Image (cartoon, grey):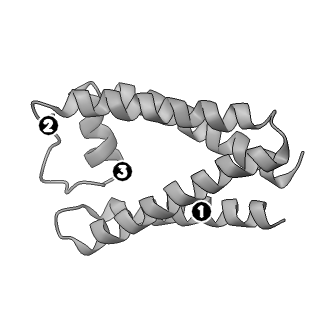
Amino acid sequence: MSALSVYLAWIGAANALGVGLLLGALNERFADGLLRRWTGMIPPDQPYQHSAFGRVWLWWAAIGTGLFAALNFVALGWPPAYARVIAWGDVYCYGSFEALAIAASLSSRWGPGVRVAHVLWIGQTGWGVWALLR
């Protein structure tokens, strides 16, 4: 299995798991656990509560993440030149997510757990570049 195939399979699986977490977050108690109690992404003294529009945003995120998972899985069977387009899209997204994580880390509105996102986003971006340059 090529480095690119392993990367695409991992990203597809991670996004499939992400769909499950996003759907779970439709439950406010689960969302609070995920964002505040378990990961520390939001400050510990501010319990998470859905806004009037939060569930719609979660559905949109789950649908988009599901497509992202499917694209990565489907690209496993594509010719390498086409699969690389999906991997470059992954690199673009995860690099952009890292830029957002940097901004969140510099803000006092987020909890200390947001710093853990750097490991995820830098790791997935760097791994993607590495797999693409092999």
Residue that numbered label 1 is attached to: 125
Q: Which quadrant of the structure image shows residue 114?
A: bottom left
Residue 31 spot, x, y in % from top left: 28, 35
Are the residues flagged by discs 1 and 3 in contact, CB closer than 8 Å?
A: no
- Label whose residue precedes the other's in the sequence (2 or 1): 2
Quadrant of the snapshot with the C terminus: bottom right
- Secondary structure beneath dot 3 equals loop
Looking at the image, residue 109 lies above or below residue 23: below
Classed neighbour count for the residue bearing mark 2: other residues with Cα under 10 Å, few (<14), some (14–19), many (≥20)? few
Q: What is the quadrant of the N terminus in the image?
A: top right
Q: Nearer the viewer, mark 1 or mark 3?
A: 1
- Front disc: 2 or 3: 2
Q: Residue at x 35, y 63 (%)?
A: 100
Left/right placement of residue 51 relative to residue 91 reads left
x, y percent for residue 25: 31, 31
Vertical arrangement, residue 67 with respect to residue 92, above or below: above
The amino acid pointed to by label 2 is Gln
Image vertical order of residue 3 relative to residue 9, above or below: below
Mark 2–mark 3 CB contact (< 8 Å): no
Identify the residue shown where x is 26% and y is 24%. Answer: 27
Task: Give the residue at x 30% y 32%.
Answer: 58
The residue that label 2 is drawn on is 49
Residue 108 in the image: state x and y as whole percent. 17, 70
Q: Secondary structure at mark 2?
A: loop
Q: Amino acid at mark 1?
A: Thr
Q: Which residue is mark 3?
A: 39
Foreground mark, 2 or 1?
1
